[in-house]
Amino acid sequence: LWHQKLGRGGIQGGVHFGMAVDDSTLYVPMSDFDGGPRWPGKPYPGMYALDVASGKVLWYQRAQDSCEGRENCQPGLSSPASAFPGGVLSGAMDGRLRAYRAADGKVLWDIDTVREFDTVSGITAQGGSFGGGTGPGLKGRRLFINSGYGIYFHMPGNVLLSYELEDE
């Protein structure tokens, strides 16, 4: 029905592990880093929202580079996105988990998970890059996501995070 090129592609560019859809909007997390010589040009990492019927880009929110010198850190979005009423969630290769507003892509929530966490089992765990085949899981008022993806020179980690929506 339609075709839309959003990023330049590359060895670790493009859509890696999945998109999300909510009503008439397709959310596309884009890694778009490490283009290499076959994929020259400017990278466009970040979150895209497209109209499902036409493929028209509704908005684009560029991934902010918050690596601050961290080794094996890139700002692109490699893990799958998860849509929820009014927004979309996605984890980035820089270890940041963000919620984007569905209407315009404004970042509503942003947390850095590249740190140590005290776990319920009493063991210290480390957060890292978001990647792999599982994106944010939503159940009721809770959000679950794993942080840490050390393959292919990304930031390793080993923590399952759980957040709960606060009362207003």
Image: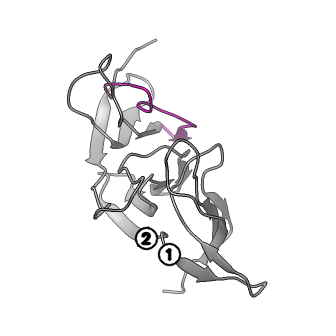
Q: Residue furthest left?
A: 42
Q: Nearer the viewer, mark 1 or mark 2?
A: 1
Q: Check if residue 34 falls in the magenta segment.
A: no
Magenta stretch: dominant SS? loop
| Residue type beneath disc 1 | Arg
Residue at the (32%, 60%) spot, across then down = 67
Q: Is residue 76 above or below residue 40?
A: below
Structural distance between the alpha carbons of marks 1 and 2: 8 Å
Where does label 1 land, which residue? 115
Depth check: give the residue in front, 110 or 128. Answer: 128
Q: Secondary structure at mark 2?
A: strand
Residue at the (46%, 36%) spot, across then down = 26
Depth check: give the residue in front, 136 or 96. Answer: 96
Residue at the (53%, 40%) spot, across then down = 21
Q: Check if residue 14 falls in the magenta segment.
A: yes
Give me the disc on residue 112: 2
Q: Quadrant of residue 71?
A: bottom left
- Give, as a single range, the part of the protein colored magenta: 8-24
Q: Quadrant of residue 64?
A: bottom left
Q: Position of residue 136 (x, y in %)?
A: 60, 57
| 61 left or right of 141 in image | left
Residue at the (63%, 62%) spot, across then down = 145
Give me the disc on residue 43: none
Q: Position of residue 157 (x, y in %)?
A: 60, 63
Q: Position of residue 60 (x, y in %)?
A: 28, 42
Depth check: give the residue in front, 24 or 119. Answer: 119
Q: Position of residue 73 (x, y in %)?
A: 39, 54
Mark 2: few/some/many CA within 10 Å (<14, 14-19, 20+): some
Q: Quadrant of residue 46?
A: top left
Callouts 1 and 2 close, C-beta under 8 Å: yes
Its colouring scheme is one colour
Q: Is residue 120 above or below residue 85?
A: below
